[in-house]
Image (cartoon, rainbow, N blue to C red):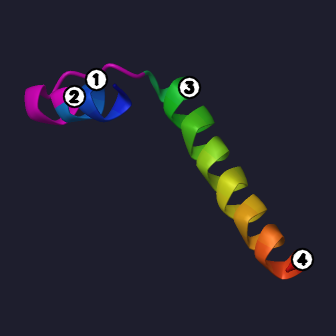
């Protein structure tokens, strides 16, 4: 669903997400990457 909405947003040029949501999503992605690297270090 998210991919479909992102594709619609890109093709139509309409912004579905506001800046705050985008910042939160970027923060979530950053934390996920950090978490993955920490898991690798533990192995």
Q: Earlier in the sequence, mark 2 or mark 1?
A: 2
Q: Residues within 10 Å of mark 2 (few under 14, many from 20)?
A: some
Residue under numbered circle 1: 15
Instruction: Give the x, y percent position of residue 17.
Output: 40, 22
Decide if residue 33 is on the left or right side of residue 5: right
Q: Quadrant of the C terminus?
A: bottom right
Decide if residue 5 is on the left or right side of residue 25: left
Give the CA separation, mark 1 to mark 3. 12 Å
Q: Residue at x 20, y 21 (%)?
A: 14
Instruction: Give the x, y percent position of residue 25.
Output: 56, 37
Q: Earlier in the sequence, mark 4 or mark 3?
A: 3
Q: Residue at x 81, y 69 (%)?
A: 39
Tell which of 19 and 16 is nearer to you: 16
Asked which quadrant contains residue 28, the reply is: top right
Decide if residue 16 is on the left or right side of residue 38: left
Residue under numbered circle 2: 9
Callout 4 secondary element = helix
Callout 2 secondary element = helix
Q: Earlier in the sequence, mark 2 or mark 4?
A: 2
Instruction: Give the x, y percent position of residue 42.
Output: 89, 77
Asked which quadrant contains residue 10, the reply is: top left
Q: Earlier in the sequence, mark 4 or mark 1?
A: 1
Residue under numbered circle 3: 20
Question: Which numbered dot is residue 42?
Answer: 4
Give the CA separation, mark 4 to mark 3. 33 Å
Tell which tag, 2 or 1, sits nearer the viewer: 2
Is 21 magenta? The answer is no
Give the CA separation, mark 2 to mark 4. 39 Å
Tell which tag, 2 or 4, sits nearer the viewer: 4
């Amino acid at each position: 669903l998210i991919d479909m909405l992102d594709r619609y947003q890109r093709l139509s040029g309409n912004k579905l997400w506001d800046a705050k949501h985008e910042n939160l999503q970027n923060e979530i992605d950053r934390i996920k990457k950090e978490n993955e690297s920490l898991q690798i270090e533990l192995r």
